[in-house]
């Protein structure tokens, strides 16, 4: 267990994920200043289910811009999943929140065959979408690496944080993609049929 400054957001930040933040509230200007001064980290509890419970510890990697009024653009990287045990707002003598947290660590060894299957499904999705600005699937080593790019709802992303097994997360991701891709294909087929309505069609008459 540890104590961390806390910056609740209505997003899910994943371990290992780069996250850029624009800091403008006075309390979070103070939080960032304290972290930069002390070389400390802070937590981002994911407030997507209207509760403060799970989140991710993050580290400030760079301050990319400082504005005259004290606002900042910062780059962070996700470290570990955390569970908030004691949320205090404000925290100690600070303007921002903080409290006691414990770290949530995966309890199993990753099944390589599941990872391969997951990456194949992700590649299939990306091929179907036909987008060029997408991550390199060959570099994916965890569901967290690609969790924001596979069409999950915020509450489903939160479910990934709740899982203490990477294999469980991989199975969840595979199951999601096995349902999503056919649904997208059906939607595309329906769209194509709708576009055909009203057009002149050359139809062969049925022979009875």
Image: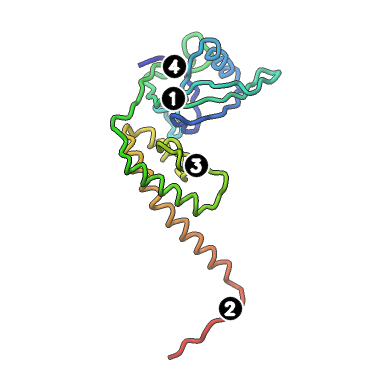
Counting from the top left corner in percent of width and height, residue 200 is at 61, 77
Labels 2 and 1: the sequence-earlier one: 1
Counting from the top left corner in percent of width and height, residue 202 is at 57, 81
Q: Determine the secondary structure under disc 4.
A: strand
On the rendered structure, is 152 left or right of 116? right
Classed neighbour count for the residue bearing mark 4: other residues with Cα under 10 Å, few (<14), some (14–19), many (≥20): many
State how far apart marks 1 and 3 are (Cα): 21 Å
- Return the mark for residue 4: 4
Which dot, 2 or 1, sits closer to the camera? 1
Counting from the top left corner in percent of width and height, residue 49 is at 43, 34
Quarter occupied by residue 45: top left
Residue under pointer 2? 201
Classed neighbour count for the residue bearing mark 1: other residues with Cα under 10 Å, few (<14), some (14–19), many (≥20): some
Labels 3 and 4: the sequence-earlier one: 4
The colour scheme used to paint the residues is: rainbow
State how far apart marks 2 and 1 are (Cα): 58 Å
Residue under pointer 3? 136
> Do residues under tags 1 and 3 come within 8 Å of each other at their CB atoms?
no
> Do residues under tags 2 and 3 come within 8 Å of each other at their CB atoms?
no
- Return the mark for residue 79: 1
Q: Determine the secondary structure under disc 1.
A: strand
Which dot, 2 or 3, sits closer to the camera? 3
Q: How many marks?
A: 4
Which dot, 4 or 1, sits closer to the camera? 1
- The residue shown at (46%, 51%) is 125
On the rendered structure, is 65 left or right of 47? right
């Amino acid at each position: 267990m540890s104590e961390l400054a806390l910056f609740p957001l209505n997003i899910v930040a994943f371990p290992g994920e780069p996250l850029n933040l624009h800091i403008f509230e006075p309390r979070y200007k103070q939080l960032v200043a304290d972290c930069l001064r002390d070389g400390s980290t802070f937590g981002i509890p994911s407030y997507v289910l209207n509760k403060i419970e799970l989140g991710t510890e993050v580290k400030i990697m760079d301050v990319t811009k400082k504005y005259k009024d004290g606002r900042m653009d910062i780059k962070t990287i996700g470290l570990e999943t955390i569970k908030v045990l004691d949320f205090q707002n404000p925290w100690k003598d600070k303007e921002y929140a903080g409290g006691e947290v414990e770290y949530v660590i995966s309890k199993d060894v990753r099944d390589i065959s599941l990872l391969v299957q997951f990456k194949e499904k992700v590649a299939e999705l990306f091929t179907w979408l036909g987008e060029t600005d997408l991550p390199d699937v060959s570099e994916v080593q965890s569901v967290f690496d690609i969790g924001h790019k596979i069409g999950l709802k915020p509450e489903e992303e939160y479910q990934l944080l709740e899982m203490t097994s990477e294999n469980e997360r991989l199975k969840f991701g595979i199951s999601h993609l096995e349902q999503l891709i056919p649904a997208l294909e059906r939607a595309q087929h329906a769209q194509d049929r709708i576009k055909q309505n009203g057009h002149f069609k050359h139809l062969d008459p049925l022979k009875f």
